[in-house]
Image: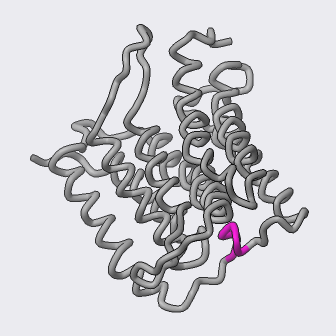
Amino acid sequence: MLPMTLSTLANCAIGPVALLILALPGLATPARKLVVVIVLLGCLDVAATMLPIIYKPLQFPGVHWNWAGKLFDLAAMSAVAIVLMATKTFSAPDLGLTLRQAPGTGRAVLFVMLPWLVFVAAITATMFGEATPSSHETLLYEATMPGLAEELFWRGILLALFDRLYTGRFTLWGAEIGYGVFATTFLFGLVHALAFDDHMAIQFAPLGGLMAAVSGFLLAWLRTRSKSLVLPVIMHNATNLILESVPRLL
């Protein structure tokens, strides 16, 4: 087992604590019970993902990436989604669990999704690209697991919960934008930027956080515009795959 150091616990707590802060004003709304659900959901996401890292026998042998953790997380979030739908708290479309795309989704792909992927490829080639090719395992992992597990949590369940907690909306380029978009965008950037090292010193990566926040906003926008998680999953995995496969040319 991996020892649970103070820094490990602190890093695991970043997401749930931030979720609590973002959800606390919801205690003054009729949907106040969802505040507890949001925080517990954050704890479950961390626990499921970290379980094979903490307890090594649960990890798949001979791999370098946390496949088991992502599969546990996907299973846990799928179970939560089933419970939310079974209790009629949310419908499948509320959570983005539909293959049907909203009218006009093609324009969103053409004018938002594809330009973003071209931009990611360009900055990877000039700033982030690696000198040596990534392993086949890395490419396969990035092409599958992050989008499947994370989109169900971030842009599926979590976005729906925050939007139910705070009901204000406005339309942006054909997408209904609510508090869920801003909450998930902020948190997605935060967890990619902030970490504690072994000495409990705060490590902050502003560029990585900014990139994650912009990506998170576009993924959330695409989710609300298309009314489905299909394109966010594809865009998420495509972004990660580009970051791992495009070499640095300059």
Vertically, is 60 above or below 147?
A: above
Going by the image, does 206 lie left or right of 250? right
- The residue furthest left is 250
Q: Quadrant of residue 203?
A: top left
Vertically, is 166 above or below 112?
A: above
Q: Is residue 94 magenta?
A: yes
| Rendering coords of residue 127 (x, y %) | 18, 45
| Rendering coords of residue 183 (x, y %) | 51, 54
Work out whether residue 162 or residue 144 is closer to the camera in this orientation and state it. 162
- The residue furthest right is 87
Going by the image, does 192 lie left or right of 115? right
- The residue furthest front is 28
- Residue range in magenta is 93-98
| Rendering coords of residue 111 (x, y %) | 33, 80
Q: Quadrant of the N terminus?
A: top right
Residue at 62 percent across and 45 percent down: it is: 24
Residue at 51 percent across and 15 percent down: it is: 7
- The residue furthest bottom is 103
| Rendering coords of residue 165 (x, y %) | 66, 60
Residue at 45 percent across and 84 percent down: it is: 174
Residue at 87 percent across and 68 percent down: it is: 88
Work out whether residue 45 or residue 123 is closer to the camera in this orientation and state it. 45
Vertically, is 175 above or below 122?
A: below
Work out whether residue 232 or residue 7 is closer to the camera in this orientation and state it. 7
Going by the image, does 14 lie left or right of 71? left
Q: Is residue 100 magenta?
A: no
Work out whether residue 244 or residue 151 is closer to the camera in this orientation and state it. 151
